[in-house]
Image (cartoon, rainbow, N blue to C red):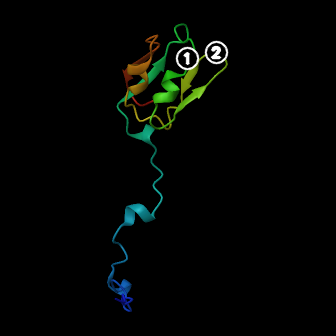
Amino acid sequence: MTIKQQSYPLFASSQVPGDLCPIATKMNPMLPGDWRSMKPVVDRAKCVKCAVCWLYCPVQCVVEKAAWFDINLATCKGCGICAKECPQRAISMVAGRAP
């Protein structure tokens, strides 16, 4: 039994419109911090630098400081996972986008 190789293309690329997927082809300057509705605030007195917030953050916006962890608000999408997972309850979510 011989398998015959396909000698024609699966589709004609000339038939595909140029604007089929413009979102995936153009860089968008918007960051997650531009559309969030809640922002995390770290209570530096409560933070014991356990790094749980850093481990659970899905966009990795938690940054390490000398004695605590802080949040990069430009990339934070405001999901609140860091506040929920913090064992010391050192992170609270407050309304607002402005840093």
Tag 1 secondary structure = loop
Q: Name the amino acid type tagged 2.
A: Ala
- Check residue 64 in the rendering and tell me which mark sits there, or answer none: none
- Report which quarter residue 98 is drawn in: top left
- Report which quarter residue 63 is drawn in: top right
Name the mark nearer the viewer: 2 or 1. Answer: 1
Q: Residue 9: horizontal and vertical position, in percent?
A: 37, 87
Q: Give above or below for 56 relative to 86.
A: below
Residue sitting at 51 percent across and 35 percent down?
Answer: 60
Q: Residue 95: horizontal and vertical position, in percent?
A: 35, 24
Q: Mark 1 — residue? A: 50
Q: Mark 2 — residue? A: 67
- Report which quarter residue 11 is drawn in: bottom left
Q: Give above or below for 7 relative to 16.
A: below
Circle count: 2
Extreme-top residue of the structure: 45
Residue sitting at 33 percent across and 80 percent down?
Answer: 16
Residue neighbourhood size for the residue with mark 2, other residues' Cα within 10 Å, grouped as few (<14), some (14–19), many (≥20) = few
Q: Residue 64: horizontal and vertical position, in percent?
A: 61, 25
| Whole-number angstrom distance, CA of label 2 to CA of label 1 | 10 Å
Q: Give above or below for 42 relative to 39.
A: above
